[in-house]
Image (tube, coloured by chain):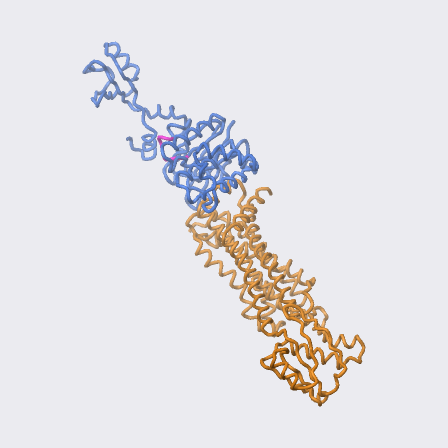
Chain colours: A orange, B blue
Amino acid sequence: MNKLWRVFATEYIRRVKTKGFLFAVISMPLVVILAMGLGVLSVKMQTNTLPIGLIDLSDEFTDAEIPSDFASFPVSPIDIIRYSDINEGKTAVFDKKIQAVFVIQPDYLENGAIEVFMAENPGENAFDRMRDFLRKNLISDETEAIVNRVQRGSNFTIKAFDGSREANMRDWFVVLFPFMVGLIFIIVINISGGYLLQSVVDEKENRTMEIIVTSVSPEQLMIGKILGNLSVGLTQLLIWLSFAVIGLAGIEIIFHYGQPPTIQPIHLILLSGIILPGFILIAALMTLVGVTATEMHEAQQVSVLFTLPVVSPFWFAPAILQHPENPLSAFLSIFPFTSIVTMPLRISIAAVPDWQLGLAIVVMWISAVLALILAAKAFRLGMLSYGKRIKIKEIFKGRPVYE
Amino acid sequence: MQAIKAKNISKSFGITKAVNNISFNVASGEIVGLLGPNGAGKTTTIRMILDIFKPDTGSISVLGGPMNETKKNQIGYLPEERGLYQDITLDQCLSYLASLKGLGTKDIKDRLETYLDSFDLLDYRFKKVKEMSKGMQQKAQLITAFIHLPKLVIVDEPFSALDPVNTQMAKDLLREERANGTAIVMSTHQMNQAEELCDRILLIHKGQIVLKGKLDEIKSKFAKQEILVKAVSALPLKIEGVDFVEPENQHHRLYIKEGVAAKDILADLVKKGIELERFEIEQPSLDEIFIQTVTGKVG
């Protein structure tokens, strides 16, 4: 166990100390900061800090209270200034004391007409402020509960017939979840798989493996490598996710999307039943390829055979989203390589039968364990066979085949 | 104590019998030379000792029994091909390999300091392995094999890429470890080095042991019927038991008859009053024995 830990720790530390890793880790937050900066800039450009003018020709809002502006960063609160005369309001606009003057027309209650006079386009916040003023005052005689509900709007929840799945339309996390899962998986497996492939091929090429296996068993070496390199990918992902959460929180503040994301039990089932064995499956296959190939470029070419099917459900995403119950969707969510992306996609929009979810989990775990066993066989066979490609037949038999 | 006891071990790869029913022992405190031409089965034998390969038949006892995790920590190995991580520092590389042999951080630090110093590698401690010459990497590899004070060490071409000074340093290390009771198996093609260091040799050819024993015994067995003589006065024209005399630069080569002992020739010369500066029975070199055994040709 101690030696397994040594292999794991060395693999992990060696990788996270590389310039490539540090660059990859830093590049993501920079992109997030840049995206946030652009977001703030975009919102700022759409807003104007000057007050707005109000002229009420309908006499419906003569004594109306002007509510406080609860605008938050990056939008600045703006005042509403009453004018009794249109020319006075126009002069204020011309003198740049206000950004626009809103003239509520005499027949406003019938047709909602408001004329806006401006020197240049007013900010989006000016219209928001005026809408808020009108809405609050139009229902000012109603109870506080009604006023609040009108202000906050309605909350729609989509439910499956059997009640097994439900999604709140405001819960954008539910919509994003399957795509995030797929992307995260692909990112981690690309990072970790690349490192793992490199590590196995390098160690075989520089003959270090021959020395290492006189100290640890090939299985310890293999598992240490898989865990070490997988942890590198997860570390990178964790750092990125931390920044992504900060970024999303920033976007939430800027754009006010609604309630924060919630983790549901089904997410945990997917993580432990599909995603985790998925990682093991691909990592084991990467090891198998690394140890059986003769050179790095050859290993990279072969590894595409495993990574491509993982991405493939994205090509069928429109079909899966429109027809989550059809046989293709069901097959893709049970087949080990495509299940990783397809099952979360289907679960987010439809009631996947429990037997299909259960079968997918069983198939995924069996595949992962079989891949590990095959990788261990290949590791023993390939670790000392320099310049010689291992045949598939040899891996299955667990011994060299001479023809 | 026997560090290795191999009994009737065989290993085949397909129809190729790499090792064919060989038996041998290696005791603590001796250096045994594992010799043989390319493809003779030396590497397969080494890998079976190290438990990298399992023998098809026969058994190997290492340090008193079958190989296990504890024994792996008591074995050192220097493979023929260099096996060091190229992209990390020498310190990181050697520390990692030593830690896999069960050494603690403090021991690694202390011993590494001592070994690097004695091998003139201290200045390279924090440099990347790939920046070091082949000879330096070979010295680093030697450190890897010995840093954990193993009871059994297997070295494959230990002097490869080493200059004469470093070769001497490596030889001293092997002798020192032998004196400390370490059993050493040395595989090499450099017969002069084997001759200088090995107590016993095992010559493997086509998977079988074709020659084994103490070096002097083997040499006696292959001794030539020739004597080198340097006399102060002229040698007599006829010497009892000698077929003919061949003058060479500073001496004469005496080809003695079959069944005649060298001591009888010496006695005859002394009896005839010949004053001698040199009287030496010509021994075959290990190189000659090797070629003769492997090819069947007498050099």
Per the image, is B290 magenta? no
Q: Is residue A239 left or right of residue B243?
A: right
Number of numbered discs overlaid on the protein picture: 0
The one nearer the camera, B285 or B179, is: B179
Q: Position of residue A45 (x, y in %)?
A: 58, 73
Q: In the rendered structure, which segment of residues is drawn in magenta?
A: B187-193
- From what the image shows, is residue A221 above or below residue B109? below
- From what the image shows, is residue B268 above or below residue B45? above
Q: Position of residue A351 (x, y in %)?
A: 67, 70
Q: Is residue A110 left or right of residue B295?
A: right
Q: Quadrant of residue A138?
A: bottom right
Q: Position of residue A402 (x, y in %)?
A: 43, 49
Per the image, is B188 magenta? yes
The one nearer the camera, A214 or A143, is: A143
Q: Position of residue B228 (x, y in %)?
A: 26, 20
Q: Is residue A153 left or right of residue A96?
A: right
Q: Quadrant of residue B164?
A: top left
State which quarter of the image contains the N terminus of chain A: top right
On the question of residue B201 being in view, the answer is yes
